[in-house]
Each structure stands twice: as C-alpha cells, then as structure tokens.
Amino acid sequence: MAASINNATSATDLETVENLTDMKQIQDAYLKLCKDEEELSKDLDNLLENQTTLEDKMIGLHKTLPNLQILQTDSKQLCSMVTFTSTLAENVSSKVRQLDLAKSRVTACMQRVEDILDLKFCTDGVQAALQNEDYETAAGHIHRFRSLDENVLKLSSDMNQGTSLDTSFKHLHEAEEKMKTIVHNKFDASVQARDVASIERFFKIFPLLDLHEEGLTKFGKYLAAKLSEDADKRLILVLKGTDSTDRRSNVLFADAITQLFEDVARIIEIHQPLVEAKYGSGRLITLLKIIQKECDRQSRKILGEFKSKRDFDSRLQHVQQSLIFHKQLTVEKLDPKDLDVLLSEVVLLNTRTELYLRFLKRRAFGDLETAFQDEDKRKEKEAEVDKVLQSCDLSRLLQEIIGSYITMEEYFMREMVLKAVVMDSTDSGSQTSSMVDDSFFIVKKCVRRAMSSSSVDGVCAMINHACTILEQDFREVLFNRVRAGFPSGFDLTQAYNIVQSSIQQGKLQSSDIEKTKAQFLTTLNNAEVSSEYSKALKSNLEEEVLKLFAQCNEQSIAKLESCLSDLGAVANKFKDVLEFGFSQLTSSVIKPKIKPQIDAFLSTSHNISEEEFSNYEANDPWVQNFIVVLDSMLGSFKESLTGTNYDKFVSLVTGECTMQLEKSVMKSVFNRLGGLQFDKELRVLVAYLTTVTTWTIRDKFARLTQMATILNLEKVNEILDYWGPNSGPLTWRLTPAEVRQVLSLRVDFRSDEIKWLKL
Amino acid sequence: MEDYKYLFKIVLIGDAGVGKTCLVRRFTQGLFPPGQAATIGVDFMIKTVEINGERVKLQIWDTAGQEKFRSITQSYYRAANALILVYDVCSQATFDSLPQWISDIESFAKHKVLAYLVGNKIDQINSKEVPTYIGKQWADRFEMRFLETSAKDAENVDILFYDIAVELTKDAREKDKLESDCSGFNISPNTKTINRCTACFKF
Ligand SMILES: Nc1nc2c(ncn2[C@@H]2O[C@H](COP(=O)(O)OP(=O)(O)O)[C@@H](O)[C@H]2O)c(=O)[nH]1
Ligand SMILES: [Mg+2]
C-alpha cells in the first residue's frame, strides 16, 4: 500500500519533475525519488521471502485431502449400524413381554397343579386325619379345600383326569359334612363331660368349617350355663347372709350383682383373645348377646330377691301413699330415716350396673374398631351395640328401680328438711338457727347420693327436686316467719310500758315479744345465709358433677348444666325474702324510731340570733340526742344480725335519715347563723355515721351536704362560685330548681335576686 | 350466638308413642326421623327464634312417656314456662290417659302455667279415632289451648311453638315493665361521687 501511494506520488512527482525549473527543487526531487526506489526494492525482497512458506502450506493441504474422504465413508457406516441396533432392541423387548406373559401363565398353571395336588393331598389327608381323630388336621384340610376355586379347577381338568377330580371333590364334601356333625357332637359331648380343654379344642374348629355363628352360639351357651351355675350357688349364700350383722349386709345385693358382673367381665376378658384369634374381630357382639341374656336372667333374680328382702315395693307404696294423702294426717307416714340405708344400696346397684354396661360397650366398640375400617359400616354396628345394651333386661330393670328411687329419695329429702324445720333451734351466740345448716346438709347429701348412682337422669331429677324443696317448702317457712313481722314498740319508753303491762298480765308477753323479735332477726339471717348457701351448693355440686360425669356425652353434660343453673337461681328467691324482711323492719322499726327525732329538728328554730347560736353551742338542741337514739338502735341490732345484714340495716337507717331530713329542711327557714348551725349539725351526724359503717356514707349525704353549703352562703350570688364552670370536680345532686328552692329558705335572701340568678 | 333476651322452658308430656320426640325434632331440626327409638328419661333441644325483633331461646324438654320414667319427668314440670300435652288422634287410648296427665300438671306444675293440648298425627285421616271437637272440648274444660298437628307433614308444628313463644314473650315483657315501674325510688342518673371538693364543704 505504502508502495502504491509512493508510486502515485511518484507519478505526480514525475509530471512535476518535468516542470521543474529550479535546480534546488530538481535535486530535492531526485533525492526523494532515490529514497522511494530504495523502499520499493525492500518491499519486493520481503514478498519473495514469503513465497516458500506459502508453497509449503499448499503441499501440506494436498497431503490431507485423501484422509477426509475416508472419514466420510466411516461416518456413513456408523449411522447404519446404530439404526440396525435400535431395531434389534425393539424386537428383543417385545420378546421379553411375550416371555413375561408366558411366565405368569406358567405360574398360574403351576398354582392349579399345586391346587390339584393339594386337593389330592387334602382328600387323602382328610380320610387319614378323620381316621386318627385328628380333627384339627382334618378341619385344616377342609378349610384349605374350601379356599380353592372348585369351578376353575374343574374347568382345567381334561377328560380322563376329570373323574378323579370329581371324586376328590365328592370325598371332600362328604368329609366336610361329616366334620360338621362330628364337631357339633363332640363339642356337646365335651360340655356334658365338663372337659374344658376339649370344649376349647372344638370351639377353635368351628371357624375352619366356616361355622362362625354356630361356634360362637354354642360356646356362648356353654359360658352362660357356667355363669348361671356359679350365680345360683352364690345367690343361695347371699340369701343366707341377709340376717347377719356383717358390715356389708346393708349392701348385700349390690355386692351380689357386682360379683355377677365381675364373673361376666372375667369370662369376656379370658375369651375375647381366643375369639379374636380364631374367629376374627367384629364377632364379639354375638357372644356378648348370649352371655348378656344369661346375665339379664341372673340380674332379675338378684334384683327380685333384693326387692322382696328389702321390702322395696311396700316401702315405695307407703311413700306414694304419703305423697297422695299428705294433707290427711290420718295416714301414718313412713319415717324417712327408714329409707336411708335402702337408698344407699339402690344407688350402689345402679352405679355398678352403669359401670358394667360401660365395660361391655367399650369391649364391643373396641372389637368393631379393628374389624371395620369403613366409618359408616362401623357406626351402624355401634348403633346395634348401643341398642342391645339399652334394651337389655338389666337396663330396663334398673330404669324402673331408679324411677322408684327418685320418688323415695325426694320423699326422704323433703321429710328430712321438714323435720329440720320442726326441730329448729338457735344456739345462744349464733345468728342463724339450726334448720339452715341442717336443711342444706340434707339437700346436699341427697343430691350427692343421686350422683353416686351414675344415672344422669337421676341426678338431674334430684337437682330439680332440690330446687323445689329449697325454693318452695323451705323458703315458704322463712317467708311466713318474716311475714309475721317484727313487733313494733321498740322504743325504749314503749318497751318499758310493755314490760310494765306484761308484768301485770303475768310477765309472759314481754318475753314473747323478745322471742318474736329474735326469731325475726334470725330468720333474716337465715334467708341471707340460705342465699349464700344456695350459690355455694350449686358451685360445689357443679364441680363434682363435672368430674364424675366427665366422660358422658355432650347432651348429658348440657342437661346437668341446665339443672344446676336452676339451682343457682334459687339464691335470688332467698334474696326476695330478705328484701321483704327488711321492708318490714323499715316500717316497724326504722321509720317510727327516726320520726320523733326529725320532729325535734323541725321544732328547732334555724332563724337565730348570735345569742341563740352560742346558746345552741352549749346546749345542743337535737342532734346529740338523735345520735344517742341512732346509736342505741344500731347497737341493739349489731349483735343479732350477720355482717351483711347489719350493713344493709345501717344503709337503710342512713337512707331513712337523709330522706326525712331533706324533707324537713325544705319545710324550715334559715338565716345565715341558722345555716351555719345546720351545717355544724350535719357534720356531727355524718361523723358519727362514718364511725359505725365500713363503707363510705358521704355519698348518701351528698344532697344534704350541698343544701347546707347553699344555706351557709353570705350572698345569693356566691352560689355562682360553685356552680357551672366553677363547680370543679363537684357533681351537683340538686337541680337548678332545687338550688333556688333551698336559697329561698334563707329569710335574708331576696326572692327576685334568686329569681334572676343565672343557673 | 349466645345473646338472647328471654329463655323459656317448654316441656312435652303424654303417652309413649304419640309423637313428642318427632314434634320436637320437626321443629328444631326440620325433619321427621324414620324409626324413632323410644325416649329414655328426658332429652332437651334448643331453638332460638325471633319474636318482634327480639331473640328468644326455647329450651324444649322432651320426656319419656313410659310409666317408669314418670318420677324423672315430673321433676321438670315446676320449672316449665309452658307445657305441651300430646295425644295421638289415631289412638283413643292415648286420649283416655289425659286425666292422669292433667292431674300431674295440677300437682307439679306452676299455677296457671301456659298449657297446650295437642292432637298429633292428623296426616292419618283414615284412622282418626278422636274427633277434633272432642279434643277442643277437653282443652276448653281445662283452660288449655288446642291444636292438631302432624309431625310427619310439618302441619301446625311451627305455629304451635311460635304461638307459645309469642305468648311467653308477651308475659315476660309485661312482668319486666311491672318491675321497672315498681323500683320507684330512682337514684338520679348523676351518681358520681364528690371527692375532691370536700374542702369547699368544710368537712
Ligand atoms: N303418621 C304419623 N306418625 C307419626 C307422627 N309423629 C310421630 N309418628 C310416629 O309415631 C311413632 C312414635 O313417635 P315418637 O316421636 O317416638 O313418640 P314419643 O314416644 O311421644 O316421643 C314413631 O314411629 C313415629 O314415626 C305424625 O305426625 N304422623
Ligand atoms: Mg319420645
């Protein structure tokens, strides 16, 4: 490139050379041309030098050319080989598939052959085993043969072999029939001979002959017979023991039925594994039904004896008669105490039965669980078990007995409570009387006894009856006593007069009045305590019930809860009695007591001179006396009332004081000093009442205190310092109208000023 | 769920097999159970209904009719706000036992309890043994309300229970009103206590 440029340059240079005129320029051009020539020859040399290497490379290329041709042919060969191999592989794999099929046919064929051989073996074996009385082996052969598919085998036989196969089958069928008869007979014979080992031996053979139901039925009957024998023997012993003074003689029949249940339980415990192993699971119920039938029979006997030996029916009748004719006193009542022992045995009978039935249910359900994976099928079977257990004779007998038990238990509870009421007494120093503790003790005892029967319906019924007895019978007693009222004439002077007059009339009356008063207050206390006891009874029983019946279904728990909540509500009914009693006390004691004192306030002038004011200071006009009267009244009740009732009493007294005082203030007139005087009096009164209460009474006096503030003002307008935005944390209990009304009680305040006041 | 204004207890009584359980299940679950097993002791079901915009919870006690359960079922009478005495219109025998049931109500239930006489199974028109007017006469004589029902065809079942719920709600409302009127000594709504201001009252 450089050269060509140079050439070009030189060409142009040549033209310019021809035009050159200046020597110096010519010389320069010459020099330049020389230099160009030199460069050109150098370039040429370089090119000539490369020629050899290029020629070498060309020769190398020529040499590799034949190798490439070989490579191409080789590749073509490889390709055809791969195609061939793949076709071959396809062929082989289809052959393998065919082989596999053939192999499985061969296996099936071998199975058939084996079956046929087995059949022959069975046919021969059965005969031999039967001959040797080796029944297990014989049954094993028959079981094996029964598992073969007879029709298929017959198809696979060819003509000449067919006859021998047919005879084999014929022999086996005959052998099977023979075995069935033998097993039946031998089993019966073993039972006859009481040969336990043989019984179990043949029991195990039944399922091999596909005689599950028959085997279980026979075995069940055998077990039932054994059960019956033992139970009969025991009942004879039990009946001998009824007269004894043994500690357990009171629960003899409960013990007897418990032993029966234990026997059944033992039989099941022992034989369930055997049944499951030889008969498979899901069949226990068949056995249970048979054994339960015998248990029913035995239970009926025991319960029958129980009823007759314990005079159950006649006592029940006696109770029922007492209930029907309870108003006619001519019928001699059954002493409730006579029932106590009997009732305890009944609940024991029932709880044992419940326990036993629950055991059976658990066993049967457990068996079904392993047998049936399918939920629906299992549920269906479980329902069947439930039905069997619920409708068995034993269940029904106990339902009847529990029904009668409730009638008698209710009678016992009511009569005992009434007895407690009749025998009511008050210990000196006690604020309540004996009937409260006694009655609640009895009620609790009865409900708890019902609980120990494990019968949910029984407990619910007894809780219902407990509500009725407390809420009606017992509460009525309290209510009637309260209704009789608190004798008035509590005033000291009046009391003195009464004492005087009664002394004249033979002294009896005054002590009677004192007794009536004491009884009234005791009744108030009884009502208060009863209300508390009801709540406690409910929560105690609730705790126990939830523990005892924890594994019951939701429905039963809901039933129990509902009945218990009714029991809790009984507390309110006693509160009503209490309210009524206090209203009696208010009208017969509190009001008459406070009235004269309020009158004294009314007759004390609060429109007073300086002189009168200081005179009042020295000789208090009424409040000191009021406090003396209040103090003696409160003091006389303090000891006789329970803490809660005393607080209530003080609260009522305080309420009466404030109400009456408010009314009287509104009826009085005041001047500034009178207002000050009233304020002083009020403070003394509040200070006194604060000392006798445990709670703050200031709130009760809020309105009066605010009235005193108003009556104590210098000027009408001063009220605004306490009113509206200036009231601060104070909440006014007086309406604006009332404020004006109180202001107008001040003789020295002008009515138009009050009227124009912006409240 | 659990909020309701009133809770009422309704107890069903009557001979076994007259359809008490079916009536309860028809009302509470809206179905007629095939092959209903005899009730043992007592059962209860709950249904909350709306009466004049207020939720009323009905606790319905279904009792067993058999004699042996009598002492259990009788214990529920006193707390009942309403009783439903059921007989089977196709069975004179169940109607003939009514005097016994009525005497039970008189001895154990609250005085003047709301009571209904119900003749069930009127779907079986052809085998009806107790004419409607006879049932009605009885109900009138004992101051009971009267209805004929079919648990199977759902006839008059909702009407029966709703009527009871309406009546009981009405009674309860009146009682509520009476009580609120009686608690007359009204504490003024402003019952905040004066505490800080004791200074200005010089106590
Ligand atoms: N045809 C008809 N059958 C009824 C009716 N109600 C109940 N039953 C049937 O009467 C039988 C007893 O019913 P159930 O509710 O168990 O009576 P309970 O003992 O009073 O509770 C069952 O077979 C029911 O199917 C009804 O309204 N019509
Ligand atoms: Mg029923």
Image (spheres, helix red, strand yellow):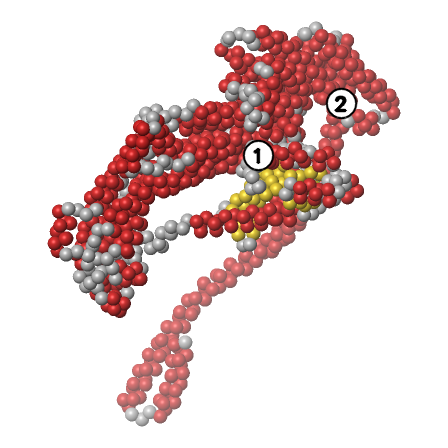
Residue at left offset 21%, top offset 43%: A625
Task: Residue A321 in the image: state x and y as whole percent.
Answer: 59, 24
User: As displayed, is residue A191 above or below residue B178?
Assistant: above
**From mark 1 to mark 2, how far is it between C-alphas?**
68 Å
Front-most of residues A16 and A86: A86
- Give A494 or A619, whichever is nearer the viewer: A494
Compared to residue A677, the image places residue B35 above or below, namely above
Left or right of A532? Residue A92 is right
Q: Quadrant of the N terminus of chain A?
A: bottom left
Q: Residues within 10 Å of mark 2 (few under 14, many from 20)?
A: some
User: In the figure, is residue A368 to the left or right of B177?
Assistant: right
Say which of A428 and B51 sits in front. A428
How packed is label 1: few (under 14 Cα within 10 Å), some, or many (20 or more)? some
Count up the numbered dots: 2
Q: Which residue is mark 1?
A: B108
- Are the residues under marks 1 and 2 on the same chain? no
Residue beneath the point at 67% across and 44% down: B140
Q: Residue at x 54, y 57 (%)?
A: A63
Which mark lies nearer to you, 1 or 2? 1
Report if the beta carbon of the residue with label 1 is closer than 8 angstroms to ligand 1.
no
The residue nearer to you, when weighing A234 against A685, is A685
Task: Determine the secondary structure under disc 1.
Answer: helix
* Residue at x 60% of width, y 46% of height: B164
Q: Which residue is mark 2?
A: A146
Q: Is residue A454 visible?
A: no
Name which residue type carries label 1: Phe
Which chain is disc 2 placed on? A
* Residue at mark 1: chain: B
Image spot of residue A647 (x, y percent): 31, 39
Check the image and name the residue furthest to the front.
A504
Q: Position of residue A389 (x, y in %)?
A: 63, 26
